[in-house]
């Protein structure tokens, strides 16, 4: 549906006050601008009398979205010289304005002026207005609404991209889709005359109305009926519920209730035919009972004191019902805003703040930011904070070393960088008392306080210096450990990288016999001997030591001569013990050599080459007692038989320790080790394992057991072994031994034996030169085997000779 208006106020047409173009196909219309503009088919109308018309607010709202108009009317009159147009506008904030224009160029010009001024009164907002951009819509009813049919498109903008906007239609048969179209959920045959659409998002909460025209009770369809010519205007039963926004100041005092505003019903009906109702949070919902409404007059009252910091606004709904409780008008939104009072002091996030600033920082360096919060309305001076420093402790060298930005709370340095010297200031810590005052810092503002502790941190602007240019120490030869502590002075802040020292030896230690470390407790350099010094090699040592800081020095400071020192170390002579060479001494000898045989000659020398001393030798540790040593010459001979198979021999090696003692004062000793690698001699006869074998008397397998040879000697004095039957007469008639490999042989029975224990003699011979043989026996138990169990004899064993084997069957026969 569209409308058009044309300019009709020019001198050639003094008798024409207004010319409107109408469009036909009338659905419904009344004697209003809205009804007239619902027509199509261009017509022309000339009037020569005064005409008053009421223009519905949504007409201008569609043209000027930022304007919220409750009522707009225009009156046109004819004068002798020119037409005049008077326009009266009522905005949502109860602002009334009237224009009376002479010789206006066009109606559109006047409407533009009304929209512009009305919009300014309504807040002067030129940008986006969150909510429905058009509050009222018309929808023609053509007998039914089809399911899924897009009927009209509403205009809603929450000024934040319309994300997560939720719409609710008063008639659940309709919904608003993603393209903002009003769509039936089902076929609708009858509709309410007015539909309310509630749009809600995180940034907007607004309601629009859709008037459904063309319902069964229709208005006259003729132009005569539109203009009311020759007939009485119909009685308009529809009411207009006007709910202006209301404000309440927080912290009001008794008496209560207090009136805060009034709801209006614009109607031609007689008064007293409706009852006002107030619903929503603050009325009939928690917090209940804050607001009430006079059911007859629509006056809204507050019943007790409010706290804006708890709830800053209330959205209620006002409606009217008849005496039977049937809804007549609404519900319409009532917005009650709680006006702030300055009843909250600024509160700092922390009561004590700490910050640091590096010494020598330029003036204007930001140290920290103080932040206070005020619970009052941030859009008012009640929460407009200003910061100020009221005290500095200590106040030397200046009481104004720091400045705080009144609005941002940034604390910056005022003192010059040269005076901001940690080493010359009376203290390295300053405490500031900060006050935050609301009301933009005016005298009536409330205040909050906090403290700021600022530490002047150190930078490495002082090089460490040795307390002496020369340090001296004495150390005995052969000893290790700390010999001297080097002390330094550093004016920088202790326990920082600018103070902690790092020492290094830059000259005089080619053999790396010294090392230096920093004592973490006192920053001293601990010079120590890491390798024993030798008096005879070099008696005095001179070292050059350098000290630096962990952190680098600032560019304009360097390390001077005082950062190096000389250390003289005197080595004192001591009587050193004899030293064996080589140590250990390793020799190879055959085991079982004759007692008294030569084993080795020990060689020990005295490091004290500047002294003439003699050395004597002795046995310190000889586990088997096999050795002796000449005290003077150090010759080692055998005093017992060397046995490679002895438990004192490990991995064919026997170890003994000898001691050498000089005749110094006091005497000094040294030890040396002799390792004898023993070569094997065939001095151990082989033997057979296992020593016991079992066989079933009725076994079909005549194999008794596989036996193997063992020898304590090493190859070639051990395997391969030769295992054969003993030399007793007749053994080969019953037993047989067959070689399996170089170490094992198979023992077999040539004929069955009865249950008994038999001693089978065997002869085993090794491969040594000359070879060694051993006559041994294995015990063979012939058992009765039943159900996988062997029942063996516990009696004595029989010699496995031919006589015994022949006698055994005879004994069995006699027993029978």
Image (tube, grey):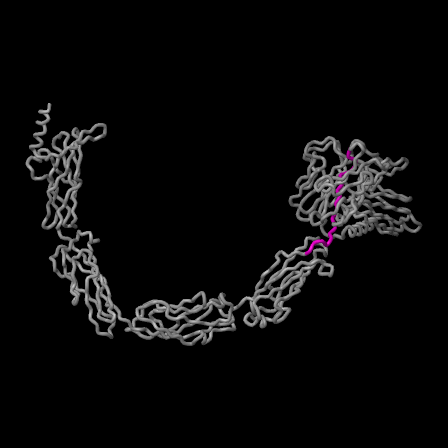
The image position of residue 408, as x and y in percent, is 65, 60
* Residue nearest the viewer, comparing 201 with 809: 809
Q: In this view, does 55 lie above or below 695?
A: below
Rendering quarter of residue 453: bottom right
From where the camera sits, is residue 502 visible?
A: yes
The one of 165 and 295 positioned closer to us in this rendering = 295
- In the shown orientation, is residue 421 left or right of residue 615? right
Please provide the residue range marked out in magenta.
326-345
Q: In this view, does 660 lie above or below 199?
A: below
Prevailing secondary structure class for the magenta stretch in the rendered image: strand
Picture quadrant where residue 536 is located: bottom left
For this orientation, the residue located farthest to the front is: 666
- Could you say where residue 451 lies in the image, as x and y percent from the top left? 62, 61
* Viewer-closest of 67 and 567: 567
Residue 59 in view of the camera: no
Left or right for 430, reference 614: right
Residue at 7% x, 35% y is 730
Q: Where is residue 513 in the image (x, y as percent from the top left)?
A: 34, 69
Question: Which quadrant does the N terminus fall into?
Answer: top right
77 horizontally vs 791: left or right: right
- Examine the structure image and report whether residue 748 is included in the region drawn in magenta: no
Q: Please identify the quadrant where the C terminus is shown.
A: top left
Q: In which quarter of the image is residue 331?
A: top right
């Amino acid at each position: 549906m569209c409308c058009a208006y044309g300019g009709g106020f020019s001198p050639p047409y003094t008798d024409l006050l207004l010319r409107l173009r109408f469009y036909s196909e009338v659905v419904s219309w009344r004697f209003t601008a809205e009804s007239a503009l619902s027509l199509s088919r261009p017509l022309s109308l000339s009037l020569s009398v005064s005409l008053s018309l009421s223009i519905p607010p949504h007409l201008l709202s569609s043209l000027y979205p930022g304007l919220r108009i409750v009522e707009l009317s225009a009156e046109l009159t004819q004068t002798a010289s020119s037409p005049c147009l008077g326009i009266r506008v009522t905005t949502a904030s109860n602002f009334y304005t009237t224009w009376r224009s002479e010789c206006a160029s066009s109606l559109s010009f006047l409407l533009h002026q009304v929209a512009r001024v009305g919009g300014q009164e309504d807040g002067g907002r030129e940008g986006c207005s969150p909510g429905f951009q058009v509050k009222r819509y018309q929808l023609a009813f053509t007998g039914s609404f089809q399911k899924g049919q897009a009927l009209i498109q509403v205009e809603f903008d929450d000024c934040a991209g319309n994300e997560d906007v939720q719409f609710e239609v008063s008639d659940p048969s309709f919904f608003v889709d993603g393209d903002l179209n009003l769509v039936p959920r089902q076929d609708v045959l009858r509709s309410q005359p007015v539909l309310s659409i509630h749009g809600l998002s995180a940034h907007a909460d607004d309601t629009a109305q859709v008037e459904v025209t063309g319902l069964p009770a229709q208005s006259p369809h003729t132009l005569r009926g539109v203009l009311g010519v020759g007939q009485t205007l119909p009685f308009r039963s529809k009411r207009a519920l006007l709910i202006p926004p209301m404000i309440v100041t927080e912290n009001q005092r008794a008496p209560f209730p207090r009136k805060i505003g009034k709801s209006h019903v614009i109607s031609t009906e007689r008064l007293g035919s409706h009852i006002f109702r107030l619903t929503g949070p603050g009325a009939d919902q928690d917090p209940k009972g804050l607001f009430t409404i006079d059911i007859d007059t629509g006056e809204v009252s507050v019943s007790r004191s409010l706290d804006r910091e708890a709830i800053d606004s209330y959205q209620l709904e006002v409606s009217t019902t008849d005496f039977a409780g049937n809804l007549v008008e609404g519900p319409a939104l009532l917005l009650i805003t709680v006006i702030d009072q300055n009843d909250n002091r600024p509160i700092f996030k922390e009561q004590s703040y700490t910050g640091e600033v590096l010494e020598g920082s330029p003036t204007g360096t930001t140290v920290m930011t103080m932040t206070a919060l005020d619970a009052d309305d941030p859009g008012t001076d009640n929460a407009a904070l200003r910061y100020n420093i009221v005290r500095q402790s200590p106040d030397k060298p200046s009481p104004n070393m720091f400045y705080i930005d009144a609005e941002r709370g940034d604390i910056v340095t005022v003192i010059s960088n040269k005076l901001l010297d940690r080493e010359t200031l009376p203290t390295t810590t300053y405490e500031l008392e900060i006050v935050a005052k609301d009301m933009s810092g005016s005298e009536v503002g409330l205040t909050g306080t906090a403290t700021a502790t600022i530490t002047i941190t150190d930078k490495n602007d002082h090089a460490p210096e040795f307390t002496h240019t020369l340090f001296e120490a004495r150390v005995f030869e052969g000893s290790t450990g700390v010999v001297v502590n080097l002390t330094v002075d550093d004016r920088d802040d202790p326990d920082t990288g600018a103070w902690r020292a790092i020492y290094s030896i830059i000259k005089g230690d080619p053999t790396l016999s010294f090392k230096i470390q920093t004592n973490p407790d006192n920053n001293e350099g601990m010079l120590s001997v890491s390798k024993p010094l030798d008096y005879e090699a070099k008696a005095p040592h001179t070292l050059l030591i350098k000290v630096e800081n962990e952190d680098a020095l600032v560019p304009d400071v360097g390390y001077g001569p005082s950062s190096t020192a000389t250390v003289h170390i005197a080595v004192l002579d001591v009587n050193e013990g004899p030293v064996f060479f080589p140590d250990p001494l390793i020799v190879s000898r055959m085991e079982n050599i004759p007692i008294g045989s030569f084993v080795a000659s020990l060689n020990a020398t005295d490091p004290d080459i500047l002294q003439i001393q003699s050395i004597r030798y002795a046995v310190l540790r000889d586990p088997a007692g096999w050795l002796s040593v000449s005290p003077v010459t150090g010759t080692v001979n055998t005093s017992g038989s060397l046995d490679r198979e002895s438990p004192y021999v490990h991995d064919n090696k026997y170890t003994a320790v000898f001691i050498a003692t000089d005749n110094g004062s006091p005497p000094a000793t040294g030890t040396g080790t002799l390792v004898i690698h023993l070569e094997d001699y065939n001095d151990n006869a082989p033997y057979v394992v296992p020593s016991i074998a079992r066989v079933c008397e009725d076994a079909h397998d005549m194999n008794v057991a596989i036996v193997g040879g063992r020898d304590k000697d090493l190859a070639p004095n051990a395997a391969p072994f030769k295992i054969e039957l003993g030399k007793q007469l007749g053994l080969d008639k019953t037993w047989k031994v067959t070689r399996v490999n170089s170490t094992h042989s198979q023992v077999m029975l040539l004929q069955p034996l009865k249950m008994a224990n038999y001693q089978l003699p065997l002869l085993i011979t090794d491969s040594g030169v000359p070879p060694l043989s051993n006559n041994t026996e294995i015990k063979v138990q012939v058992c009765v085997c039943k159900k996988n169990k062997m029942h063996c004899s516990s009696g004595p064993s029989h010699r496995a000779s031919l006589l015994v084997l022949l006698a055994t069957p005879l004994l069995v026969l006699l027993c029978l």
